[in-house]
Image (cartoon, rainbow, N blue to C red):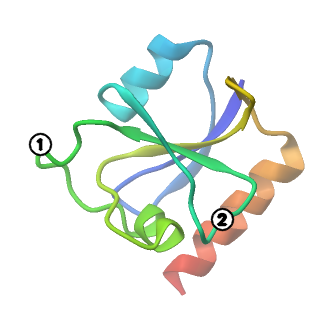
Amino acid sequence: MRHVLVTTNNEATVVEVANDDAIRTLIGGWMEFVSPRGLPRYTLIVDDEGLMKNKPRNEIASAWYGGLIVGDILVCKVQETEVRGLGEEECEHVMEEAKKCLS
């Protein structure tokens, strides 16, 4: 599945993720799903224990969410209870929205 990884270094890149274990490796912990107000139709996957681990603020994800998000995150879509990857146009859209957050 294709997702967009947004890091605390303000970088957004498209990544291929095979399974939940790979997602946990990328975000550095257990998954929590967050609905960002500033990026409707998408879901952010964040580290559930990011604050306890003192991870740095993720400026882009925080802007999308409208509150504090820490650590690296993945952008995906969730359909019912299934995480699904993003299509090419969706990845491009997320990447453009990330750039806007930094302007």
In this rendering, position of residue 72 left or right of residue 87:
left
Q: Residue furthest front?
A: 80
In this rendering, position of residue 52 left or right of residue 36:
left
In which quarter of the view is residue 73 placed?
Answer: top left
Q: Which amino acid type corresponds to the residue marked 1 in the rendered image? A: Met
Q: Determine the residue positioned at 61% across, 22% down.
A: 17
In which quarter of the view is residue 58 placed?
Answer: bottom left
Name the N-terminal-most of marks 2 and 1: 2
Q: Position of residue 100 (x, y in %)?
A: 62, 80
Q: State the residue position of label 1.
A: 52
What kind of element bears circle 2? loop
Q: State the residue position of label 2.
A: 39
Query: What is the crowding at mark 2: few (fewer than 14 residues within 10 Å), some, or many (at least 20)?
Result: some
Quadrant of the drawing holding the N terminus: top right
In this rendering, position of residue 39 left or right of residue 62:
right
Q: Determine the residue positioned at 57% across, 54% down.
A: 35
What kind of element bears circle 1? loop
Q: Position of residue 50 (x, y in %)?
A: 23, 43
Q: Which amino acid type corresponds to the residue marked 2 in the rendered image? A: Leu
- Marks 2 and 1 sit apart, C-alpha to C-alpha, by 25 Å
Task: Using the image, determine if residue 40 lies above or below residue 29.
Answer: below
Nearest the viewer among 14 and 52 is 52
